Image: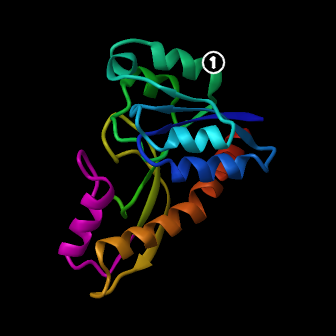
Amino acid sequence: MKRIVIFASGSGSNAENIIRFFNHTKTAKVTKVLCNNEHAKVFERCKNLKTNCLHFNREQFSKSDFVLNILKKEADFVILAGFLWKIPTNIINHFPKKIINIHPALLPKYGGKGMYGMHIHKAVKENEELETGITIHYVNANYDEGGIIFQAKTALNNADTLETIAEKIHILEQTYFPKVIEEVILSTNE
């Protein structure tokens, strides 16, 4: 059974969905959630799910091997679920094609530094896009530029608000993210 460590920065709805999904499979198990925001709701979700959640700071993340050492002990795969910091090179190098992110847009559109959450939905709305979606991709040294694993789309119309766009994206995330992670894990076992 493979081990998953999740990185999260916020509410943790995707982290919770992934934990619940893998609690019912023999493919993998979430061993830990790591969070860079000590006030994030993900801590409460993890407590309710009896999953260890640990806070870390920027220095422990990018100026030392503190986080890398945790990952070496507890992770075969690293999943970014609403995590807002760029992954340092030492972690990327140790986990090639083993770090997976979800992005709430159809990359390569609306990617890069500062493009997350409502910022993306606002740009999609302002540009009068006819569709948006999610992109699940590998993580490399640049924001949102790793190889694309999977995309799912949803139609938009003029009546959509930022909130309805966010809800459409949330449904896609909840539906596909855990299944795609499992497919990637299974494909690397062959």
Q: Residue at x 73, y 40 (%)?
A: 28
Relative to 111, say whether 130 is above or below.
below
Q: Residue furthest left?
A: 126
Quadrant (top left, top right, bottom left, bottom right) of the C terminus: top right
Residue nearest the observer in this picture, 45 or 77: 45
Residue that appears at 58% across and 45% down: 45
Q: Secondary structure at mark 1?
A: helix
Q: Find residue 127 and report its horizontal and vertical position in percent.
A: 19, 74
Q: Residues within 10 Å of mark 1 (few under 14, many from 20)?
A: few
Q: Is residue 118 magenta?
A: yes
Q: Which residue is mark 1?
A: 73
Q: Position of residue 141 (x, y in %)?
A: 34, 33
Quadrant in the picture for residue 4? top right
Can you say whether 91 is above or below 166 in the image?
above
Query: What range of the chain is rendered magenta?
Result: 110-132
> 53 or 23, which lies in front?
53
Check residue 13 for magenta coloring. Answer: no
Q: Would residue 79 be visible to someone looking at this image? A: no
